[in-house]
Amino acid sequence: MNCMLCPHKCGAYRDLNTGKGNCGLPLSPKVARVAPHMWEEPPISGTKGSGAVFFSGCTMKCIYCQNFEISAENQGVSINAQKLADEYKRLEEGGVHNIDLISATQFLPEVIRSFDIYKPNIPIIYNCGGYERIETLRALEGIVDIYIPDFKYSDNKLGREYSGVENYCEVATEAINEMLKQKGKLTLSSDGIAQRGVLVRHLVLPNHTKNSIGVLDILKENFGEKITLSLMGQYIPHGKAKNHPKLSRRITKREYQKVLQHLMDLELDGFAQELESAEEEYIPLWDYADENASP
Ligand code: SF4
């Protein structure tokens, strides 16, 4: 196919074994880790964990990505739709609260096929950077129960400079609008586990409180009380960001407090991470084993 899956709209030729275009990946899915994950928000991880499937590659190339070995360097193991379906079943039988597809857009046709093979009886989460096409999201209608998009930038220049994408702000706003149309506001079960809806994440970057405040304003203006926000302060410099003049340190308490105060002033619904949790660095092991690979 000539790939138009994400807003880069490369039109590059891709098949199961050949990968071109901005993401540089074939259509056959590559995964770096499939395991219960306890580090999402409480309604997502719950007590038994989220069934995380970390896909390799990404439609965004954030220079500070904590998963840069898989998102930028495309590390991982190729598997097919059948094997993906088997993994969903294994996670579900292990008791996780949901299946959490992390950065799957570049493999969408095979991911959709995997759910034709097996659709778990727990919520399916689509976890992405917010840089999505409406057409692609519509293909997920009926499969996905919960969308977890980032809203990273209120300033498109930052999107270009830090993530290699154009028009981030408009694209992410339209994408979240479509997600809300499909799933509505985040709803929880009686025991506090997310069942359907949209949870928007925003990571506060060092030296960029103005960007964060702009993001909160955009969310409030466009979506108001329909939005549930997760404000994250656990930024730790990774990859190219380690040597970046603005991104090479953690955020300060003062920076976080300023953004948090704005969130409270706007009365946005959601979760705010304890800044103390940023003290602990957590990066998953990219340990999906070769013996699990499909021939
Ligand atoms: S998924 Fe990859 S090849 Fe397809 S449009 Fe996006 S970056 Fe280009």
Image (spheres, rainbow, N blue to C red):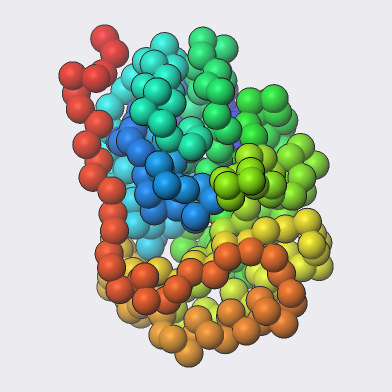
Q: Residue furthest bottom?
A: 254
Q: Nearer the viewer, residue 97 or 80?
A: 97
Relative to 56, does residue 1 appear above or below in the rendering?
A: above
Q: Is residue 42 above or below residue 212?
A: above
Residue 181 relative to residue 129: left or right:
right
In the rendered image, which quarter contains the C terminus? Answer: top left
Numbered marks: total: 0
Counting from the top left corner in percent of width and height, residue 81 is at 44, 15
Q: Residue drawn 40% across and 23% down?
A: 93
Please tell me which residue is depicted at 81% across the width and 67% down the height of the picture: 221
Q: Nearer the viewer, residue 185 or 126?
A: 185
Q: Residue at x 38, y 57 (%)?
A: 65
Where's residue 208, x and y in %? 52, 79
- Picture coordinates of residue 256 (x, y %)? 50, 81
Question: Could you tell me which quadrant the N terminus lies in?
Answer: top right
Q: Is residue 270 visible?
A: yes
Please provide percent x and percent y for residue 136: 66, 32
Q: Toward the viewer: 265 or 78?
A: 265
Image point (33%, 78%), residue name = 249
Q: Is residue 18 visible?
A: no
Residue 218 vertical placement versus 276 (above, below): above
- Tell me if 138 is positioned left or right of 34 in this view: right
Res 202 quadrant in image: bottom right
